[in-house]
């Protein structure tokens, strides 16, 4: 099982980080040890002083695929959910400055809390799905797939040019504007069209 994350896929988030708008999808990987399931608590690592939340819609791949045509990409997932792409922002800034990979900032243990999956058939259109993240009862991030730079199908087709997708692989599809730091005792709740699929505490 692979965790594949798409970066810089919402314009307003790109602006808040002062990044360049990508001409094609940007992706990176997290190991399976980053996965945090069953609403278990997230423990702040001691190597960073600036862990940021990034709520994202996640696709679960349901069949093996390589060089998938975009028009057929919708057949490669049946379920979606919400997850958090935790990022050690202080470490990421150092890595970016040095032109080094981001894994230290993105791939650490527990850096991918994952919510309950639901059938994509619950939604009329994949390009108009709302999602949001609440921390301590206050909404801090809110997004809609209508604002994606690269659609779910585009992302699947693009990734599959380079990496064979297998059953159970997870694709984090990008975060909207509003990322920020978390602290001990924060309670995070992530919603897909009003349905809470993920809830956990920071310790």
Image: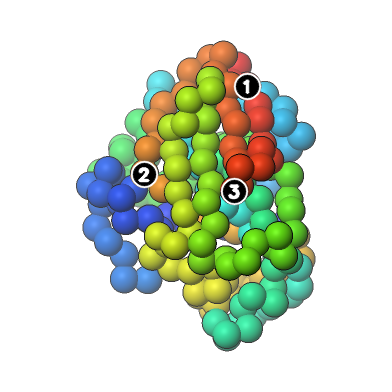
Q: Position of residue 126 (x, y in %)?
A: 57, 66
Image vertical order of residue 24 relative to residue 14, above or below: below
> Which residue is disc 1 drawn over?
201
Q: Nearer the viewer, mark 2 or mark 3?
A: 3
Q: Nearer the viewer, mark 1 or mark 2?
A: 2
Mark 3, residue position:
193
Image quadrant where residue 163 sits: bottom right
16 relative position to 175: left or right: left
Q: Which residue is mark 2?
A: 177
User: Who comes first in sequence, dot 2 or dot 3?
Assistant: 2
Q: Is residue 36 above or below residue 78?
A: above
Rendered location of residue 21, percent (x, y): 27, 61
Q: Is residue 92 above or below residue 47?
A: below
> What secondary structure is found at the residue carrying circle 1?
strand
Callout 2 crowding tier (Cα within 10 Å): few <14, some 14–19, many ≥20: some
Element on which disc 3 rests: loop
Q: Residue at x 24, y 58 (%)?
A: 20
């Amino acid at each position: 099982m692979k965790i594949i994350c798409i970066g810089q896929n919402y314009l307003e988030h790109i602006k808040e980080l002062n990044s360049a708008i990508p001409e094609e999808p940007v992706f990176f990987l997290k190991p399976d040890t980053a996965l945090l399931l069953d609403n278990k608590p997230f423990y702040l690592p001691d190597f960073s002083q600036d862990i940021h939340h990034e709520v994202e819609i996640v696709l679960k791949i349901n069949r093996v695929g390589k060089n998938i045509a975009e028009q057929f990409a919708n057949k490669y997932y049946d379920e979606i959910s919400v997850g958090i792409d935790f990022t050690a922002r202080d470490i990421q800034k150092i890595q970016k400055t040095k032109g080094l990979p981001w894994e230290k900032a993105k791939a650490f243990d527990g850096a991918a809390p994952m919510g309950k999956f639901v059938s994509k058939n619950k939604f009329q259109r994949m390009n108009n799905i709302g999602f949001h993240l609440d921390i301590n009862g206050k909404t801090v991030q809110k997004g809609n797939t209508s604002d994606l730079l690269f659609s779910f199908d585009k992302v699947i087709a693009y990734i599959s040019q380079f990496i064979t997708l297998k059953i159970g692989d997870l694709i984090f599809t990008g975060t909207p504007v509003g990322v920020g730091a978390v602290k001990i005792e924060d309670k995070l709740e992530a919603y897909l069209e009003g349905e809470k699929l993920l809830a956990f505490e920071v310790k």
